[in-house]
Image (tube, rainbow, N blue to C red):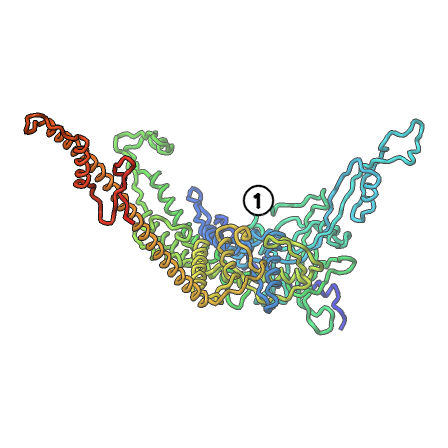
Amino acid sequence: MPKMSLSDLKAMLASERADALAAVSSSKLSSERADAMDYYLGDMTHDMPSPEGRSRAVSTDVADTIEGLMPSLMEIFGGGDEVVRFEPVGPEDVAAAEQETDYVNHVFMQANPGFLILYSFIKDALLSKVGVVKVWWEERSLEERETYYDLPDDGYAILAADPDIEIVGHSARPAVAPPEGDETLEGLSMLHDVECVRARSAAGVKIEPVPPEEFGISRNARSLRDCDYAFHKVLLTPAKLIAQGYDKAQVDALPTYSAITNTEEVRRDTVNEYQYTGDENNKAARRIEVTEHYVRMDYEGNGKAGLYQVTSGGSQGDILTKDGKPDIRPIDEIPFAAMTPVIVTHRFFGRSIADLVMDIQRIKTALLRSMLDNAYLANNPRVEVAEQFASPETLDDLLVSRPGGIVRTRQPGGLNWQQVPSIAGQVFPVMEYMDATREFRTGVTRQGQGIDANSLLNQSATAVNQVFTAAQARMRLIARIFAETGIRDLFRLVHATIRKHGDQAQTFRLRNEWATVDPREWKTRNDMTVHVGLGSGGKSEQLAHIMSIIALQREALVAGKSNLVTDQNLYNAARQATRLVGLPNVDQFFTDPATQPAPQARPDPEMIKAQAHAAQSQQELQLTAAKQQADTQHEAAKMQADAALAQQKFEHQQRMALLEHDLKLREHTMMMAARAAELAAQPGPDGQPRALDLEKILGALAQASAQAHAPPHPKGMRVVRDAAGRVSHVEPMG
């Protein structure tokens, strides 16, 4: 069977596109998404036109609900520096899987605007039933214009020899003035002014959210993986198409995409972009409609259906020629990821959050308008005027309504102002009921937006927390659906695209370290975990959980369970805690044990415990011995001090006794001398003074006195006298 002809292929693609579910072919899908966009923008003139002079107020429940979900969902997916993690295939593949995880997150968040991609991806899903993201490998040539002045000859030669540089302007002049009359300039050094264009090639993964109205898929498709046809309509300039290698003559012949005719595109436009008619004077900037078809077909005619990408241009669907041949290329898979917030089982398109809220917005808008119209009538009530009380001026005065204005009547009290009953008391409960219904359907509650102080007046903290947790369950379910469908497929496509087209190793800074990444060595990653932080609450709750885990790790180590908690476990917990507090550079605070030498083997905890007990006992014995020795030395010192004090006291008493003895001896001697003189002066028998030998008497008296009044001394002691016979001191005998 021969290969399919271009005319047959063109007809088949036109038929497939016309039958696909998309804005251009499904009026129901297009109108529902267009209405959702109108409701989001607060434009309800199509469904609820307002009569002249009546309230035009709109309750923006669709926008409030979607914008209420966006912060939590963006925090879940884009709040950290790691959106996705690839799991290793085997134990020897752990380091490679970590490097691939870091590199893919780097490509998504750094090389591409990852935050904005996630924002558009999620918001399109919440508003337009399905969010779509496209992933492809893009190779482009970049040109930089450079100008050099006063280049010497060797510098100019280097520029001229560089194959990536095209010299577009050049002038030269002698470096020094030539000799007078010499016009040949031979042998002189020259200075060159050069204007050049440096060309360099760049390649990498390109990720871009797709507007829902530009994407279409086969009606019988259940998912992107098993669908047989999908298309993507893009608007490109001729310059970009020619730069990609498409035939210039064919591109120039394609018509300009002059106006947006699709209802959904018109509703999405808020600044009248659909009125663009193209600038025919700037041919390179005009927009051309290009359609990329992804179709499963038997193009080769061998009975085997394969997946192909075919590019056509213009409204007629002419197949474009690229690099001299039709742009028909076999591909491995359709390069799109899609997700919907409310899955309709066995269908590609689900329900959007706008679908759940639009009827509530209509009801609340009707209630709000009626209440405001009631207030306007209360401020400007109708008046009853009796004809007999009315004058020609009365009606004129009533027709001019102004604060403080006067109304002239024929008689006082001739006007009766009609009392307009207020309906606010009946409207507010109904609006509260509709708000409760909206919260039940979507999970976006007022408490979820920030707990109102009044909500705690008549409720316990536990009751408020239960309401908050129940409301968050729907939001967490939406996040889990996004994680397991669109976001998982998105990163699987990014990984596969890098692995297929990355043909050389590159050096990048990952985790604050320079690493060489070679996608040619990567494995096929089917096991992938999307980190969404579900079940852990916000960052504060997650941090509390991490601190609880760290406490459990500490208790395990204290109990000696070193086989339960390793250094790497401790580092992982510390790294997660550091990131949760908003510090992405973990290496400033903790060092990865995997980058450090292996620690020494830890001794047996029981042995450590026994050694500690023995050391404690030995220390107690040493303290007891030291205390006893100190007590002994203290007692000895005390006894020695007491003995010295007793000796001093004894010597003092002896000196006092000797002094007292000498004093008494002198008194006795003087008394005896006086007695002897008295005896010598007395008359004898003959009546004459006695002539006695005074010296003998005195000597006898002194000897008697010395014997009778010897100084007292203890037993075994003797008295020592000096040369004059006076008592010197007392000392032991022998």
Q: Amino acid at mark 1?
A: Val
- Percent across and percent down for residue 656 are 22, 38
Q: Secondary structure at mark 1?
A: loop
Disc 1 designates what residue? 271
Q: Is residue 466 visible?
A: no
Pick the front one: 724 or 88: 724
Pick the front one: 342 or 15: 342
- Percent across and percent down for residue 347 are 54, 66
Q: Is residue 662 left or right of residue 455?
A: left
Dividing the picture into quadrants, the one containing residue 560 is bottom left
Residue beneath the point at 42% across and 44% down: 55
Q: How many marks?
A: 1
Q: Is residue 560 visible?
A: yes
Dividing the picture into quadrants, the one containing residue 184 is top right
Residue beneath the point at 33% across and 41% down: 378
Q: Is residue 51 left or right of residue 528?
A: left
Residue beneath the point at 79% across and 46% down: 165
- Percent across and percent down for residue 620 are 37, 60
Q: Residues within 10 Å of mark 1 (few under 14, many from 20)?
A: few
Quadrant in which the N terminus is drawn: bottom right
Pick the front one: 46 or 410: 46
Q: Is residue 447 left or right of residue 254?
A: left
The answer to whether residue 82 is above or below residue 178 is below
Q: Is residue 207 left or right of residue 666?
A: right
In the displayed orientation, state which residue is furthest to the top: 688
- Percent across and percent down for residue 169 are 81, 39
